[in-house]
Image: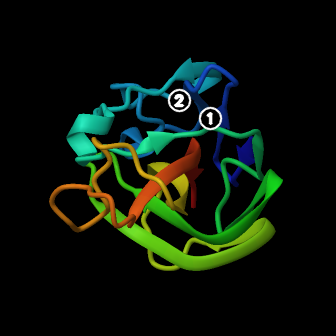
Amino acid sequence: MNAGGYHSIALRQDGTVWAWGNNGNGRLGNGSIFNQHSPVQMILSCTVTAPTLGLQEDVKLTSWTIYPNPFSSQTTLQTDIQLHNATLTVDNCYGQTVAQIKNLSGQTVTFSRGNLPSGLYFVRITTPSLNPSPNAVPAGRQGGGPQGGGSEVIATGKLVITD
């Protein structure tokens, strides 16, 4: 949950985003401009799926925690496994990569907002695959191959950045 001076935003465990408070200029994202005294679900005008992002990676999900989320300046991502040469990729709701941190090691990653505007983002951690499946396509390349170079998705999630 994130509380501002005039409105609050919360991310539920089911992935939905809820907001309440001052709704000037429609900032609560629920399709109206009326103030809300109780939580209303935000209308998010984007749907991102793996084909939209052009991802054809092996998926090997692990448990992880993102806190705080929503956040205004920085957040921490904690995994239950040791990362080695991992990459954190952040995509906006149009499927465009807006941030990337490479060569991550350890179990904790701190992600700073930088110049990213408020909104919903999709995050994933990938590691190099020594034995990619025949269908795996390394980021930025066409076709996999026996020489390696593919990637495995270790974890995926959503970030909500607020002001």
The N terminus: image quadrant? top right
**Proximity of marks 1 and 2: CB atoms separated by less than 8 Å:** yes
Q: Separation of disc 1 and disc 2 at Cα? A: 6 Å
Determine whether, in the image, residue 11 is placed left or right of residue 79.
left
Instruction: Residue 15: give x, y in percent of width and height.
Output: 58, 26
Determine whether, in the image, residue 138 is placed left or right of residue 85.
left
Which sits earlier in the primary sequence, circle 1 or circle 2? 1
**Total residue callouts:** 2
According to the image, label 2 marks what residue? 35
Determine whether, in the image, residue 16 is placed left or right of residue 82.
left
135 up-or-down from 113: above or below: above
Q: Residue at x 72, y 71 (%)?
A: 110
Q: Which residue is situated farthest in the front direction here? A: 146
14 up-or-down from 23: above or below: above
Mark 2 element type: loop
Q: Amino acid at mark 2?
A: Asn
In the drawing, what numbered circle is on residue 21? 1
Q: Residue at x 45, y 57 (%)?
A: 151
Given residues 81 and 40, the one toward you in this image is 81
The C terminus: image quadrant? bottom right
The answer to whether residue 123 is seen in the rendering is no
Instruction: Residue 107: give x, y in percent of width and height.
Output: 82, 63
Q: Which residue is situated farthest in the left direction here? A: 142
Q: Amino acid at mark 1?
A: Gly
